[in-house]
Amino acid sequence: MKKYKAIALLSGGLDSRLAVKMMLDQGIEVEAVNFITIFCTCTAKSSCKSEARKAAADFGIPLKVLNATDEILAAVRRPQHGFGRGLNPCLDCRISMFRRAGRRMREAGADFIVTGEVWGERPMSQRPDAISTIERESGLEGLVVRPLSAHLLGPSLPERKGWIDRGRLMAISGRSRKPQMQLAAELGVNDYPCPAGGCLLCDRNFAARLRLLLAKNPEPRIAEIQALKLGRLFISSGGDKIIIPRNEDETKRLEALAQPSDIIMSADGFMGPTTIIKDGNDGSIAEAAALTARYGQGREEVSVTVSWRIAGTEEASGSLTASPADGRRLAGMLERL
């Protein structure tokens, strides 16, 4: 009797773990793929990648971690199916991931794809019309098994052919996790993570930052996008981005991400932020200096001396005296994002 093989999209969360376990319990051989991007909001302590690796190890299945940043950026620039509430091209994102999973399916000699998707859990990509579009445009029509919601959808090819027992699949829908938690207890799936993470492209604040960056530079470096996640962002009257870090960790990360065209400044004699001007020019230095003074310990002074240098150099390139920006002046000269 032939042993069938599936490629599982494994995020490491509860839903995808359950989908894998349900296939393993039916004797299906499973190999997992995990997609990462720079837009993931997971923390260093509990990332999607680390949770996926832990889940794969628990199940004793192989895992491939794939970086999908380039595909997502391409979808952000030219979305075929529009955006959600932010700059999130959810359908295009799923289509690109399914295409890559399909390529891996063919390379590995697997027979179908399995996912932990739940009908109605995500409004853009987990509804019947979206599911049909994703399968059709990824070239995987009939080859995607969704064990948690199978009875709410038409039977897939593996179900019709009897490769898996449709009667052992579920009809879960909506955003409540109670049915999945009950199923996890029944299947012995333990130590799964609490709901966390997400996609920064759904965040309207980050989406606004990314739109500004792409308007100025349609092909940004990864470091430029990473910098958008950090600090308070202001737009100077000349259109330059001024970033004020909130703490020492953000300061270190911003300095590490600084490009040779960036300007770095700090107040002399006062504790405070190390300000970054992205692709700055002389016209932005005075505004950035006023902000640097405002967010440091010299904010109550009449004026503060601020020194600046070009990223990658240690010696000061110049200095100026700045009055800490007050609220009215701040609102008049800068837009905060």
Image (cartoon, rainbow, N blue to C red):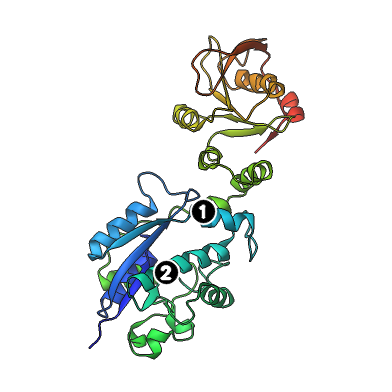
Image position of 153 with respect to 78: above or below: below
Residue visible at 72% across and 31% down in the picture? 334
Mark 2 Cα shell of 10 Å, populated few (<14), some (14-19), many (≥20): some
Q: Could you tell whether 102 is left or right of 271 in the image?
A: left
In this figure, what is the number of numbered marks?
2
Query: In terms of sequence position, does the residue under pointer 1 or pointer 2 come before the other?
Result: 1
Above or below — where is 266 with respect to 96? Answer: above
Mark 1 crowdedness (10 Å alpha carbons): few <14, some 14-19, many ≥20: few
The image quadrant of residue 169 is bottom left
Q: Quadrant of the C terminus?
A: top right
Q: Position of residue 35 (x, y in %)?
A: 42, 58
Q: Is residue 186 above or below residue 227?
A: below
Circles 1 and 2: CB atoms closer than 8 Å: no
**SS category of the residue bearing label 2:** helix
User: Circle 2 is placed at which residue position?
Assistant: 103
Question: How far from the left and from the top, in percent, is residue 243?
Answer: 59, 30
* Relative depth, front residue between 37 and 116: 37
**x and y percent of residue 142 in the render?**
46, 82
At 69% from the left and 22% from the top, the residue drawn is 287
Instruction: Give, as a three-letter code, the residue at label 2.
Output: Arg
User: Label 1: which residue?
Assistant: 70
The amino acid pointed to by label 1 is Asp
